[in-house]
Amino acid sequence: MRLDRKSTNSDERKKTNLPDWSLLVPVLPTAGKRTPALYRELRRLIEAGSIPPGSKLPPSRDLAARLKTSRGSVVAAFETLIAEGYAVARTGAGTFVADRVPNVKPAVPLEVDPVPPAMPLPGTLGVAMADARMLNRFRTLLTRHLARPGPEHFHYGDPRGGEALRQAVAAYLRQARGVRCEACSIVITTGTQQGIDLVLRAVLSQGDRVMIEDPCYPSARAAFAGNGLVLSGLAVDAEGADIARATPGARAVYVTPSHQFPLGVTMSMRRRLALIDWARETGGWILEDDYDSEFRFAGPPLAAMQGMDDSGRVIYLGTFSKVLFPGLRLGYAVIPDALLEAVVALRSRSDRSPPTLAEAALTDLIREGHFAAHLRRARRQAEAARDALVEGLSAAKSLSVTVPDQGLHLVAGLPARLADTAAVEIARQAGLGVRALSAMAVTNPPRQGLVIGFSGFAPEVLRAAANRFALALG
C-alpha cells in the first residue's frame, strides 16, 4: 500500500485497519538519527497499541521518504522488529505487526480513560491458544442454541451437568484416556480447581493429613490448605511420586501421573500400581489430575491411572481450559460411586449447575468432530511453540533444558551461582514470563529452576523473548 493522500484518508483506513501514518510520522526519529532509534520508537508504538496487532507497516521506501532517511535504515529497523517477534514478513504482501506481541495495550480514543489490561508475557503459564477456526465454530454453535433455545436453558438442571455433555465426555474419556466411566459418574465442573475443592470437602475433614507431590501445582496446594488439611510432600523423582515414602495416617494423595507438574516426568507403571495398592489397603483416596494429557507429541496420550483401578479409589479430574480456553470455565470429574451423592449435594449447594448454553455448544463441538479437529491443530501449534522456545533458550550456555514430549511447559535448569528467584526478574526485564521452581516446594528442600510455558504465544514471539533472556544470562 502506497502512502499517498488517497490511501491515508479515513475511509481507506477503516477498510484496511491501518494507523494514520501521517500522524505517527512526526513522532518517529527524523533524518540523521541512527537505525536503533527508529526501531525503538516503532517498538514503543507497537507496545502502546498505537500500531495495532496485525497492522501492515508502510513500505520501507515510502517511510524512508517521509522520514528523509535512507531506505536501508528503515529495512534494518524492520528486520530487528521481525527478529524480536514484533513483526512478521509475508512474502509478496509486506511487513505486518505480529498478532501477539509482549506488553501490547489496546489503542483507545484519547477521551477515554481506560484501565489497560495486563497482557501476559511470552512464557507465562496457563495461557491458551486462540484458534480462530475453533472460536468461529463455537460462536456458530452458540448462535444455533440461542436461535432455538431448548427448555433446559430456562430452569435449573442437574447439578452434575447436562446428560448430553456428560455422555459426550464419558465417550471421549473411554476412547482417548482409557477411563472407566459412564455419564452417571461424571460431574461437569467450572474447571479442575472446583473439582478438587468439591472432592476435598466431600471426602475429608479439617485436620486430616493429605499428601501432595513435591514440588507441586500451587493452586492444588492452595485448595488443600484452604480446606484446613495438613499437608506433607511426596517426593518426586524420574519415576514420579513415590508412595513408598507415604506419610503414616494420610487419607488422600494428589498426583499428576501422566505429566507431573511442574517437573514433567511420567509416573512409572510400578509406581502407579504401588499407589493403587496403597489406596486399596489403607482406604485412602487418589486425586488424579490429568490436566494436559491431550498434548502428547510422541505417540498417543498415555492411559489414565484411573482405568487401572478396580477398587474405586481414584477420583479423575480434567479440564477443557488447556485445549480450548480458560474463559469457557468447563471441566469434569469422574467420581467413584461411594462419593457421588456427597459431591453432587455440595455442587447443588454451591452453584447449582453448570452453564447450560456453554454446555450445549461444547456438546455439539465434541459430537460433530470439531473438538477432535481442533485438538490436532492445537498439538501442532504447541509443538511448534515448544521448539521455538527451546531454540531461543539455546543461546544461553548456562541453561540446561530438557525438551518435553508432552504438555505445555518445560523446566530449565540454572547454574549453581544463580538463584531461580533472581532469574525470574532477569527474565521479566527481557520480556519473558517464567516461574521459580523453588516456589513450588511443599516440605522437602526446594529445587532450583525455571518453569516456562509455551502455549498461547506465536513461535516467533517466544523465540525472540527467550533469546533476549538467554543473552541477558550470558
Image (cartoon, helix red, strand yellow):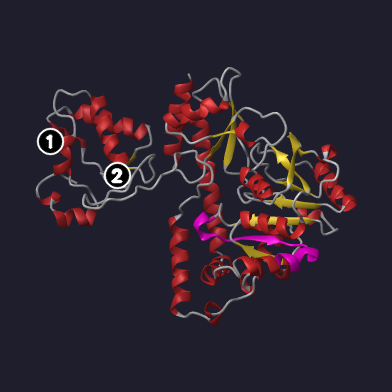
Residue in front for this viewpoint, 302 or 162 = 162
Q: CA distance from mark 1 to mark 2?
A: 22 Å
Whether residue 266 can be seen here:
no
The residue carrying mark 2 is 49
Asked if residue 190 is positioned above or below residue 387 in the image, the reply reads: below
Asked if residue 212 is positioned above or below residue 424 in the image, the reply reads: below
The residue carrying mark 1 is 66
Answer with mark 1 or mark 2, whichever residue precedes in sequence. 2
In the rendered structure, the answer to whether residue 428 lies left or right of residue 368 reads left
Give residue 252's position: percent from left, percent from top.
78, 50
Residue in front for this viewpoint, 76 or 315 = 315
Q: Nearer the observer, disc 1 or disc 2?
A: 2
Q: Amino acid at mark 1?
A: Arg
Residue that sits furthest to the bottom in the current view: 151
Asked if residue 192 is positioned above or below residue 217 in the image, the reply reads: below
Magenta region: which residues? 324-344
In the rendered structure, the answer to whether residue 216 lies left or right of residue 121 reads right
Q: Amino acid at mark 2?
A: Gly
Residue occupying image coordinates x 48% and y 25%:
470
Give residue 193's position: percent from left, percent from top.
62, 54
Whether residue 252 can be seen here:
yes
Residue occupying image coordinates x 51% and y 44%:
455
SS category of the residue bearing label 1: helix
